[in-house]
Image (cartoon, grey):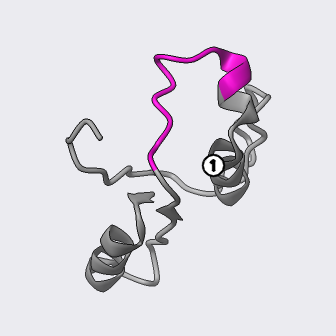
């Protein structure tokens, strides 16, 4: 998971296509520590991430998880 299309381009150039997938996120990543679980589950981006990795965002069942490892590539600024 990468923050934005520009980071997605760099990540795509550096990945091993056979083993690694890239999903650019739209806009800013939701800080889930600062919002209610209802707001997290209402987020379209959280839903899209959940579908991409093969899980239901409203469930604790991880049996359908499609990836063994997931990395989030984001910058450290506060904007």
- SS class, disc 1: helix
Q: Which residue is mark 1?
A: 45
Q: Main secondary structure of the magenta part?
A: loop
Q: Quadrant of the N terminus?
A: bottom left
* Magenta stretch bounds: 28-39
**Residue 31 falls within the magenta-colored stretch:** yes
Q: Quadrant of residue 2?
A: bottom left
Q: Is residue 56 above or below residue 17?
A: above
46 or 79, which is in the foreground?
A: 79
Coordinates of residue 4 in the picture (x, y in percent):
41, 64
Residue located 70% across and 47% down the image = 44
Q: Quadrant of residue 55?
A: top right
Q: How many marks?
A: 1
Residue located 20% across and 41% down the image = 77
Coordinates of residue 36 in the picture (x, y in percent):
63, 14
Neighbours of disc 1 within 10 Å: few (<14), some (14-19), many (20+): some
27 or 24, which is in the foreground?
A: 27
Drawn side of residue 53 relative to residue 67, left or right:
right
**Residue 45 falls within the magenta-colored stretch:** no
Q: Is residue 14 above or below residue 44?
A: below
Q: Is residue 25 above or below residue 77?
A: below
Coordinates of residue 64 in the picture (x, y in percent):
75, 48
Residue located 73% across and 41% down the image = 63
Coordinates of residue 5 in the picture (x, y in percent):
41, 72
Residue located 72% across and 53% down the image = 54
Drawn side of residue 28 relative to residue 62, left or right:
left
């Amino acid at each position: 998971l990468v923050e934005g299309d520009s980071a997605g381009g760099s990540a795509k150039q550096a990945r091993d296509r056979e083993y690694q997938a890239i999903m650019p996120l739209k806009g800013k990543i939701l800080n889930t520590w600062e919002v209610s679980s209802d707001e997290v589950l209402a987020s379209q981006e959280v839903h899209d991430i959940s579908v991409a990795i093969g899980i239901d965002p409203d469930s604790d069942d991880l049996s359908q998880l499609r990836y063994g490892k997931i990395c989030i590539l984001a910058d450290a600024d506060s904007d």
